[in-house]
Amino acid sequence: MRTILKQALLLNPEQKLNQKNDLMIEDGVIVKIGSLKEDDYKSAQVIECENKICVPGLFDMHVHLREPGREDEETVETGSNAAAAGGFTGVACMPNTTPDIDSAEIVRFIKEKSKEHLVDVYPVGAATLSRKGEALSPMYELFEAGAVAFSDDGVAIKSAEILRNVLEYSKNFGAPVIEHCEDESMAEGAMNEGLVSTTLGLPGIPSVAEDLIVARDIMVAEFTGGKVHIAHISSKNSVELVRQAKKRGLNVTAEAAPHHFSLTEESLKTYDTNYKMNPPLRTRTDVEAIIEGLKDGTIDCIASDHAPHAIEEKEMEFIYAPNGILGLETQLGLVLSELVHKKKLTISQLVEKMSINPRKILNISVPLIKEGEKANLTVIDPEIIWTVDISKFKSKAKNSPFDKRLLTGKSFAVINKGKIYMNESFRQI
Amino acid sequence: MDIKAKIIDQEGLNRTLTRLAHEILEKNKGSNNLVLIGMRTRGEFIAERIREKIKEIDKSDPNFGVLDITLYRDDFRTRLKQPEVSVTNITIDLNDRDIILIDDVLYTGRTVRAALDALMDLGRPNTIQLCVLVDRGHRELPIRADFIGKNIPTSINEEVRVRIKETDGEDAVYLVNAPNKN
Amino acid sequence: MSLSNRHLLGLNGVSREDLQLILDTATTFREVLERPIKKVPTLQGKTIVNLFFEDSTRTRISFELAQKRLSADTINFSTSTSSVKKGETFKDTVRNIEAMKVDMIVVRHKSAGVPQYLTRISKANIINAGDGLHEHPTQGLLDMYSIRERLGKIEGLKVCIVGDVAHSRVALSNIFGLKTMGAEVSVCGPMTMIPYGIESLGVKVYTTIDEAIKKNDVLNVLRIQLERNAGTRIPSLREYHNYFGITTERINRLNKEILILHPGPINRGVEISSEVADGPYQVILDQVTNGVAVRMAVLYLLGTMH
């Protein structure tokens, strides 16, 4: 089988590649770039890619696939479909499933479930047993079974002492520790604490709850020499803490979620539970700090924190509704609309933050756009204007605050493992 | 206001009120046990005038009160505008009294029905007698007035407008064409 | 004259005209409450559900009485267990109740925003009887009514809300309503009980109770909820009383005439001493009577609206 991407802009900052050219794929491998002959077109499927950008497959390092345990909300398969529709060829899934990903069996179970799918799924193992912060999970075993990082996501690793041990122990095999930064004792609320929470009468979570744990984690990372990755950073002071840590040369990285640079706490004024998330939506000042952090490299990646919830769970009284929103199918559109088209990030920076950096942090090799390499690609249509429609989501859940939002730019096609996803369907290539 | 005819002028109104006062006194053999109750808003002022007449004629000052029947209306669901409520001001005990309920125009009888319900909630009077300045007919309930200033047979397309100095700047009663309901 | 909104969700954003209309209408019902037969047929045939997801005997009784005095049919649905625990979603609970053809819903809930949510899933008029730490608009209105009844006006008065402002829905409704009516509103209490950003609402913060008494015409004294505060936000009730409690001794020392409101139930000897609670300056029981009149006014204005 032969497929030709005709006249795409081939872009991979990792290879310093930035050229408009034809690209030929045969049996899932890039066989030729440029100077195609008439012969090459024989029995080839030609995909017109004028005005489209072909980049190494996008990677979302923070998603919740809910399997095992809550298959009613999402499964490895439906989540992977959503990822493909959103332009991703790889995702890392968080361990807060039921049971938690704290045994090698569950790592293997998820790997097995995703084996045949276009999208690569990399489980993140629980750092501690049942994410309780008391005893270490069998991290070595999880790593060998395929876990690429460790986290107690949903909560921060409970104590500094356990965090220290997790960081020390993971040094043996170089896996990063992903931290959900939030001081438990200050995190009883339902939204960001501030004037808006006071006016709405909702209990607040102050941004200092996040900053405290970011500061703790940076200090313990410095002390141990371990590798800490700050998940879904959301507050201005936290961004500054990471910036300083990087200046000091520490092994600290960070990611931000699209909702934290495209929405503020003002959105909660209607008490719509689709705006309830953790970390909560914060202020305009925080949003600006996140964007600044993305621009200057303080924040390495953009990750969705894709968190599917059943309709009946979100249609609940605000304080009881669960945190989180879907992200996989709106993320690329939001990054293009809010950051690239508004000249906050270049398209090369987008590729770094959505493809290259997440893989580097997780020690996964970055796909190259090069003859002889396996084709792991996302073709982006940066100018297409479309309206988000949750009823068309591939995800099983529908909890998105971005329904009906007009976005500019989305994924046109993704290619990986000898398969292509385009026009809402998968095919072998 | 699309006037068809002026039915009562200032002098006529004065004469009519004097007559009504006489009739009330005559029927009730004085003003001792009387309570004059005016229905907001014009009935209140007509009642006030009748009270003045009784003072002149009988040298007595009958008890007096003002009734707001908004809360007893039966047309909340059909009216386009929400009626404004105001306060009922009846300070004396109505038990065993003879009540003269006073309003400007008697038409369907529904307002009077509401007033009767309202009065019953305030006590158990000996009698309730109805006094109106104008009876224009078209009753929808079995209600009749005891004292009538003037009977004015009207068509359904006409309205009777009572204007009095206190609220409208003049004393007069007009027959007008009903404003187009479309 | 009609209200400009068919629900009463809070006093935030309610216009001065609407507040005035409710307070004026309440005067009518105050008169009805003095009659031998304290009942009018105004809301005959209307069905009102009191949906109480949180215990509140007083507010529920006050609403129920107001409804009965307007001749409405009332149903009480009280449960302190959340729908989450029952397995039925909140939405299903409400849809079920609405299917019984109700015209108005009076709702009390632990979570802020539930009344707003109800307006999206129900066709009934919604009245907020207290949602989370958000608002309790009829309490705010009856406080304003009581102040106006006693002092003849609201505009220009200085009103201080004393106590656990951060955990009070009464406080926010008072702040929004009183400010719209032209009063100056302040708060006073231990800083652990003053919510973030309250100054941005145009509210002054007093740190000592003596100064608050000295500078204000009215004190609205909030209940200190023992269970919410045990040891974490105030050291003890005794210390609270010693530094923030309203006592005759304190009022006399400052030689000050001041009107005292309290939404009830009172913790005597904590936020207010018995002498003050029974003394000449308080209108605490008037507030209860006025509560029925104000709620009748709100029910009337919303229930007869087109």
Image (spheres, rainbow, N blue to C red):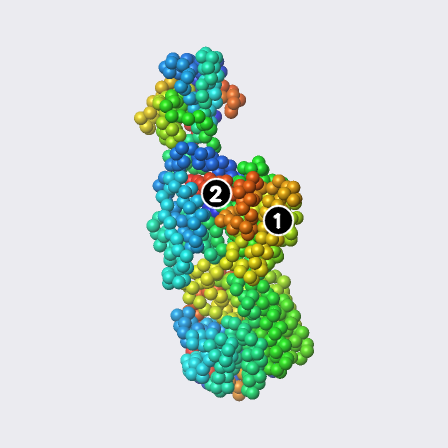
- Percent coordinates x, y for residue C101 in the rendering: 35, 48
The residue closer to the viewer here, C259 or A191, is C259
Q: Position of residue C210 (x, y in %)?
A: 65, 48
Quick one: label 1, few (<14), some, or many (20+) residues within 10 Å? Answer: many
- Where is the C terminus of chain A found, in terms of image quarters? bottom left
Classify mark 2: residues with Cα within 10 Å, few (<14), some (14-19) or many (20+).
Answer: many
Q: Quadrant of residue A220?
A: bottom right
Q: Secondary structure at mark 2?
A: helix
Residue A147: where, in percent of width, then height? 49, 82
**Which residue is at the front of the view, C243 or A247?**
C243
Q: CA distance from mark 1 to mark 2?
A: 23 Å
At label 1, which amino acid type do we have? Ser
Q: Kindly tell me whether residue C203 is visible in this rendering.
A: no
Residue C177's place in the image compared with A64, above or below, is: above
Relative to residue A329, is residue A118 depicted above or below? below
Q: Chain of mark 1?
A: C
Would you say A343 lies left or right of C24 here? right
- Relative placement, left or right, of A288 versus C50 is right
The residue under the point 48% across, 53% down is C131
What is the quadrant of residue A315 in the picture?
A: bottom left
Q: Which residue is mark 1?
A: C186
Q: Taking A15 as reference, is C67 above or below it?
A: above
**Cβ atoms at labels 1 and 2 below 8 Å apart:** no
Amino acid type at image mark 2: Val
Mark toward the viewer: 1 or 2: 2
Question: Residue C256: in sight, yes or no?
Answer: yes
Q: Residue at x 40, y 39 (%)?
A: C69
Q: Which residue is mark 2?
A: C288
Kindly identify which numbered label has been placed on residue C151.
none
- Which residue occupies 56% across, 70% down? A182
Reading the chain from its start, which is encountered first: label 1 or label 2?
A: 1
